[in-house]
Image (cartoon, rainbow, N blue to C red):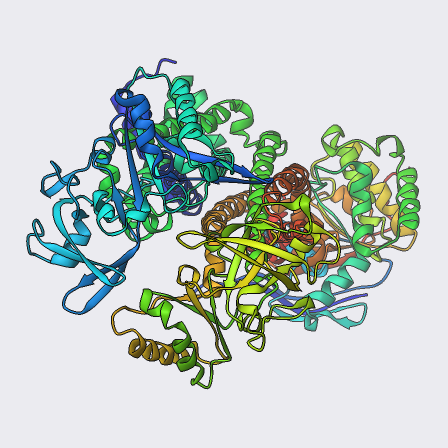
Amino acid sequence: MKVNLNRGLWNHSLKIAIRIFRQNPIFSGINVIGLVLGIISFSVLLLYYVQETSYDDHFPNAENIYRITINSTEDGSYQESARSPIPFLDFYHEAVGSELVLARMIPWPGYLKYQANQKSKENQFVFADPEILDIFPMEVRQGSLENSLQAPFQLIITQSKALQYFGEQNPIGQTLSFDEGSDELSFTVTAVIEDNPFNTHLDFDFIASIKSLDQFAPWYYSWFYPTAFLYARLEPEANLSSLEKVAQDVLNTNAKPGYLDSNPEIVFQPLTDIHLQSNRQGEWKPNNTQININLFLLLGMFILLIAIINYVNLTTANNQKRMKEIGLKKTMGSKRDQLIQQFFVESWLIIAISFVLSVLILLIIWDPLISKLIDGNTISELLVNYQLTIWVLLGLIVTSGLAGFYPTLVTIKFNPIDAIKNNIGKYMNKGIQRKTLVSTQFSISMILILITMLLIQQYHYLTSKNPGFSKDYHVAIKMADDHDIQHVKELKAQLSQLSFIQNTAASSAILGLSESFHGFDVKFPDRPNFQGIEWPTLGVDEDFLKTFDIKLASGRDFSKDYITDQSEAFIINRSAADHLGGELLGENIELSIYTGKREIRKGKIIGIVEDFHFKSFYQSVDPLVIYINQHPNFTDFLNIKLSPGSMADQIEAIESVYKAFNTDKPMELLFINDEIASTYQRELASGKIMLLFTVLSIFVAALGAFGLATHSFRRRSKEMGIRKVLGASSGNITLEVLKEYLIIVSIACISAWPLVYYLSSKWLDNFAYATDFGFVNYLIGLLILILVIVISNLHQLIRSIKLNPVEYLKDE
Amino acid sequence: MIQLNNIDKYYSSKFTRTFVLKGIKLEIKSGEFVTIMGPSGAGKSTLLNIIGLLDQPSAGEYLFMEEPVHHFKERKRSELHKHHIGFVFQAYHLIDELTVYENIETPLLYKGIKGKQRKAMVAEILDRFNIVAKKDLFPEQLSGGQQQLVGVARAIVGQPKLLLADEPTGNLHSKQGQVIMELFKELNAEGMTIIQVTHSDENAQYGSRIVQLVDGMIRSDQAVLPAHPKHEG
């Protein structure tokens, strides 16, 4: 298309465009607000998508780095672990040597001495092989990485931790004390590195040399526990499948026999896949999913689409008012491309204004709001990535450019004679394109409303469903050290003095926290078919069932009256009983517990409890074996049942008791409710983002509906006048106005409902326990949509009802 | 049936009042066929709108069927209007999106008349006006005369006591106009009260009384002389 680049004409076009803009503040305002919201939402969600897909790809040779993980199957129970056994590396290294670089990272949370007598819990403390620095090169701020992890008790710390522990002092060569039971280990800082960027799956603040472990915890070199994250960097030309095969062979030939019972299978995970595709046991931190981020990207596109539809609808509707101008210009010899130019200038003026505003608003709100919302980077970090910025800008410019075309093309089609006579009915009444576009908007809104409702309802369901144990007034003190563990009975006694404490019980795991349950081999000597099943276990004291109000189905609770309970009594849950079948009370049972060595406990089943959800509602209730534990290895928590009333006061009192009990460590308190809720954090986070952007998208759609209602009033005011003269009441008029939406809303329902039905049943399949997202919810969604339509039409509705027919029916 | 006492209609701007109607006194009995005449801007349409309860007087009393409608609330006025008054316009004012049938049916819908009876009433009117064949057409497919016929049909389908017509033949050529006026005469003979506004002396002769309006005031109010009849038939 040849556009006449006449300077005078451009000025003329621009002048008219600005006047049109000023004459129609409502239309222009709605257009700009809608587009700004659309552009901002889209940019945020696109950047979120880019951010989530960028995980770990900043490491050089990221495409050649793999995490070596283990899938295991033991007696039908399948497990995917993110970690591998520690000795594996050495055998594998011997076998493949030069073809890859291997390194382990072993998380080892502990207490670091902080100033004189303070200790602070550091969860992101790891021991690692020096090769880790080859695989994941790190930016050094102070010191040198050269030989920084070779010798025992060398330590690399991150910039922010350096600041926390050493302030302005130079940390290099200084020491930090690590609390390891009776020992205090002194680590020398060899280097300070940059903090981890947010977009890596790695999560550590301290890296200590692995050789240190040989010095103070040589037992770490075990096939069973602890486990390590194992990374491998392959040479570019290396053959992955043959390396995997070698790894499997190495494992099968060298692993301890007991280890192979679980049929371990080696899996190489590409580094950059971890954040979006891995959901294994013992991940560094919870990962995201591809579906989740796709959903958000789609959401962003939807909002932009709604905004563009608004823009197109409003602009074409508004241009119809100006048919006289167009007709006159045509008859005065304005050429087609001159007219096109006029309308392009107008279309793009609005787009340009919206665009600039969006960018400004984004720059302002990014750091305080958005970067927190999407748990991502700051604007300066984004701008550094100029390629990304350019792509986003380019995408938006192209999209909005295309959006500018359509109204122009529709407008210049007007026939000049119709136009001069202002015979706009011909072009207005059909309005099929517009209705199609509006139907699309409302279909999208309906989908978003329903999906948001689904997410929120499922989250609510998961967090409020009765798990089979009481949890609302329950907290747990995490045992900080050997002192706590050895004297847990004293702590119990001291706490029992507090009047508001109803009960206390030690346990090896936190209810609701899947990962805290240890799995051990269970045998039933009377039942040869069920030899050696690995089941989750829970080591407790005699007060546990009472503390959590767990119901017994049959048999009895543990009791201090039977001294033999401490070693010979077992309680299993109904799921375990169902698994075995038959009358189980009094049957023999054997449990192998690993307490530094394998210890076999033989005893009898004394009780069966009703199933309670000791893991999340993602899963159905697994079989569970409960036993009395007195071994320090599994005395990890002291659960406390409080009384209704001020939590703060009660916790303060507990804290002061603990302070006197353990003078060394700060108290680490867990709220059972919070721990359970944290399992569903992903649902909550997704729900929040969905809710925010759904509200935005509905607002944008409502803006459009408002604009169209204004337009529709202009078109139908005379008709409404006639109807009033014919005796239409306010109710009749209201119905008449809203009738226009009947088809639109029907289309929205017909297109959105089956899709949402499909998606929701698919998504809810992920949960063993899912909310019932029934027809009522769809009706509520419909009601919300109708409400939005009524509200956005309210102004015009009142105008229509109040309209004085005499004014609109003057015969000229 | 209609009694107007000192009706004023004016528009106030800051310091002045512009009178459209001033001191109108008019009584119209049931069964009359009154023509309101006068130059453009004399206030004819405004008077008609006030009588038709579409507009309110600024001052004065209006008794419609012995009821003081100037005291009535909007809702009650519109009830009266809906049940007793039919309107015919110069520009027909049919609803473009509705067929002939639907246009005629609309006032019955608003009166709340039930399906069967409604159908019968519309059918009767269509039949009477000889437009049964056109019932499924849209207004734009009809000639002006036909459109006005539909306009009249729509105005009387609800059997109002009072028919108001604002220049009903203004947009029609004379032959079409005559058809409409003959129809009016017939309706009047059946007992319907009719008030029309017109410029045409010829049309005025169809009525029984002529009210001359000039500058918002009644200049004359005379019966049409039966001695001077138009050729009928």
Is any part of residue B154 visible from this angle? yes
Horizontal side, residue A146 vs residue B173: left or right: left
Question: Residue at image x 66%, y 52%?
Answer: A777
Q: In the picture shown, does residue A477 fall above or below A694?
A: below
Horizontal side, residue B183 vs residue B218: left or right: right
- Where residue A582 appears, as percent x and y from the top left, is 75, 54
Which is nearer the eye, A671 or A811? A671
| Residue with the most extreme top position | A2
Q: In the picture shown, does residue B232 fall above or below A467?
A: above
- Where residue A14 appears, as percent x and y from the top left, is 31, 32
Q: State how many labels appear.
A: 0
Question: Residue at image x 86%, y 41%?
Answer: B182
Assign the C terminus of chain A to one quadrant of the image: top right
Q: In the picture shown, does residue A765 fall above or below A674?
A: above
- Where residue A575 appears, as percent x and y from the top left, is 66, 54
- Where residue B2 appears, as percent x and y from the top left, is 78, 65
Where, by quadrant of the figure, is residue A552 drawn? bottom right
Which is nearer the eye, A389 or A127? A127
Is any part of residue A305 visible from this angle? no
Where, by quadrant of the figure, is residue A652 drawn? bottom left
